[in-house]
Structures are given as structure tokens and as C-alpha cells.
Image (cartoon, helix red, strand yellow):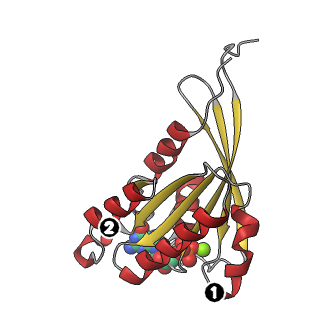
Amino acid sequence: SSTAPESKNLRVKLVLLGDSGVGKSCIVIRFVRGQFDPTSQVTVGASFLSQTLVLQDSTTVKFEIWDTAGQERYASLAPLYYRGAAVAVVVYDITSPDTFKKAQYWVKELQKHATPGIIMALVGNKVDLHENRAVSSQDALEYADKNGMFFIETSAKTADNINELFEEITKRLPRTSS
Ligand code: GDP
Ligand code: MG
């Protein structure tokens, strides 16, 4: 076989949480399909997509991505998606302080109910709209640090930091040595 002896195949359940309209679905579609569709449909309930990254040491990481709806009427379903997840990506819109507050609500939910040791990312999306920024990077970074999360600002529209988000996640995955 041409497979290196150390190579591993990891499967990673990842859930996206955050207010409706912050760009969760666009982030996933940018990552999985490399596209941005400004007329994208509102997510109902949740949707599922997967994408595999091959790392330099030839480890493959298959992300099983659960993209949830942000609407209140689905909030009670969220635990179905974050239960057993290895990674939670909490998204807000940098132009909307309300969505940053909502992100903090999701972080608290995860701290109460998610699998201990879950990897949490705080993502400030729509950084292409920086003229309308209403949440400072400094405030978000401080909040992320305090809560043991990593922080990144992205744009699904321009693709800024989208691959970097998922690369940062792979760096934090527990890797068993053999
Ligand atoms: P979701 O409800 O969190 O899944 O949000 P969507 O992915 O459906 O996006 C909501 C709206 O924000 C859509 O009109 C998108 O076109 C827009 N959007 C998403 N990401 C970005 C981004 O990075 N920049 C800009 N300018 N608009 C975005
Ligand atoms: Mg959506």
C-alpha cells in the first residue's frame, strides 16, 4: 500500500450555531463548494454537508457538518445537533451587535450541555462589510479567550479566512499517536 503508516482517517462531527442571517450556510457552501450564492435559501431545521481535508501528513479529516437554522422555533432542536459534536462553530455578523449577543447565548448553552472538551470556534462573519463594523475584533477576541475558544473573522462572500477556519480546527483535533 502507498499509505504512510502514520496516516489516519478522522471523522469529525461539526455543528454551526448562530443567529439567522449571520452567514452560517454561506460559510459551509463556500468551504464545501467554493461558491457564494447571494440568493441562498434560508435553512429550515438543519442541513447536512460533508467535506474532507487531506493534511500534510496525509491524515484525512472528514467534516460532517450540521448547519442549523437560527430561528427561535428551532432552538429546542439544537441539542440534537451539538450532542456528540467534536466541534462547534458559533457565528455572528460583525455588523450586528445583537448577533454577537446571540453568539454568547450559544456559547453558554454549549458550556452547559455539549460534550466536555468540545472544540469551540467564535467566528465573526461578513468582514467584507468592515465599513459597517459594529463589533470590535478586540471585544470578540477577549470574549473568545475567556471562554476557551479560538476566534477568527471571515467572509463567505470573498472567501477570506474560510479555509483557515477549518485548518485551525484540524490543528486542535485530538490526535492519537501510534
Ligand atoms: P444563515 O441564516 O446564518 O445560514 O445565513 P445565510 O448563509 O443564509 O446568509 C444570510 C445572508 O447574508 C444572505 O443574504 C447572504 O448572502 C449574506 N451573507 C452571508 N455571508 C456573507 C458575507 O460574508 N458577506 C456578506 N456581505 N454577506 C454575507
Ligand atoms: Mg442557514
**Between 78 and 52, which is closer to the camera in this rendering?**
78
Secondary structure beneath disc 2? Answer: helix
Residue 128 marker:
2
Instruction: Please determine whether, in this image, residue 97 is positioned above or below residue 46.
Output: below
Quarter in which the N terminus is drawn: top right
Instruction: Please determine whether, in this image, residue 171 is positioned above or below residue 12.
Output: above
Q: Looking at the picture, how far across and down is residue 119, in whole percent?
A: 56, 50
Instruction: Give the residue drawn at x 34%, y 65%.
Output: 140
Marks 1 and 2: in contact by CB < 8 Å? no
Looking at the image, residue 62 sits to the left or right of residue 140; the answer is right
Give the image quarter of residue 130: bottom left
Residue 30 marker:
none
User: Would you call the spot at circle 1 few (<14 residues within 10 Å), some (14-19), or many (20 or more)?
Assistant: few
Q: Which residue is mark 1?
A: 72
Furthest residue toward front: 112
- The alpha-carbon separation of the residues under discs 2 and 1 comes to 27 Å
Q: Is mark 2 within 8 Å of ligand 1?
A: yes
Instruction: Give the residue drawn at x 26%, y 69%.
Output: 136
User: Would you call the spot at circle 2 few (<14 residues within 10 Å), some (14-19), or many (20 or more)?
Assistant: some
Give the image quarter of residue 65: bottom right
**Between 47 and 121, which is closer to the camera in this rendering?**
121
Secondary structure beneath disc 1? Answer: helix
